[in-house]
């Protein structure tokens, strides 16, 4: 399962380059939906170094800003958005 998260992270990095977003233009930062391990109801958007992206993707975070629904407020919506999250199995 961890390999899948790492693969998703690497694919996400590839997408950044393919879509034309150069790291020098974005100051090496990306916005993610950070889903704290053990506290998925506290999902929130953060901007991180692109170097930290694989580690965040490996524990279930998602590319882009968080949507309105969270695991606590609307589990069905949340799991539709993040089907690979451990709480959505």
Image (tube, rainbow, N blue to C red):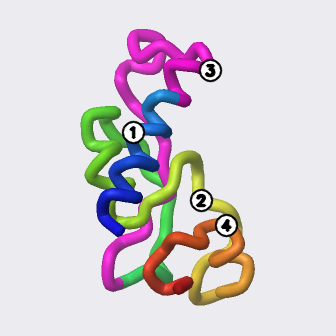
- Is there CB contact under 8 Å for labels 3 and 2? no
Task: Tell me the element at label 3.
Answer: loop
Query: Nearer the N terminus, badge 1 or badge 2?
Result: 1
The label on residue 24 is: none
Left or right, 63 with respect to 49, comes to right
Q: Name the residue under label 4.
A: 81
How busy is the neighbourhood of tag 4: few (under 14 within 10 Å), some, or many (20 plus)?
some
Query: Residue 68's x, y, as percent?
Result: 70, 68
Distance from Cα at disc 3 to Cα at disc 2: 20 Å
Query: Residue 50's x, y, as percent?
Result: 34, 33
Q: Mark 1 points at which residue?
A: 10
Query: Nearer the N terminus, badge 1 or badge 4?
Result: 1
Which image quarter holds the N terminus?
Answer: bottom left
Query: Nearer the N terminus, badge 3 or badge 1?
Result: 1
Check residue 27 for magenta coloring.
yes
Task: Tell me the element at label 2.
Answer: loop
Distance from Cα at disc 3 to Cα at disc 4: 21 Å
The label on residue 19 is: 3
Q: Which of 62 and 5 is in front in this view?
A: 5
Residue at 35% x, 41% y is: 48
- Magenta region: which residues? 15-38
- Is there CB contact under 8 Å for labels 1 and 4? no
Residue at 73% x, 77% y is: 77
Compared to residue 14, the image places residue 87 above or below, namely below
């Amino acid at each position: 399962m961890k390999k899948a998260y790492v693969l998703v992270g690497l694919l996400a990095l590839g997408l950044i380059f393919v879509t034309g977003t150069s790291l020098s233009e974005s100051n090496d930062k990306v916005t993610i939906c950070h889903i704290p391990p053990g506290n998925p109801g506290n999902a929130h958007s953060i901007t991180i170094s692109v170097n930290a992206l694989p580690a965040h993707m490996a524990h279930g975070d998602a590319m882009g800003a968080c949507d309105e629904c969270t695991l606590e407020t609307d589990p069905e919506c949340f799991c539709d958005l993040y089907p690979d999250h451990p709480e959505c199995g």
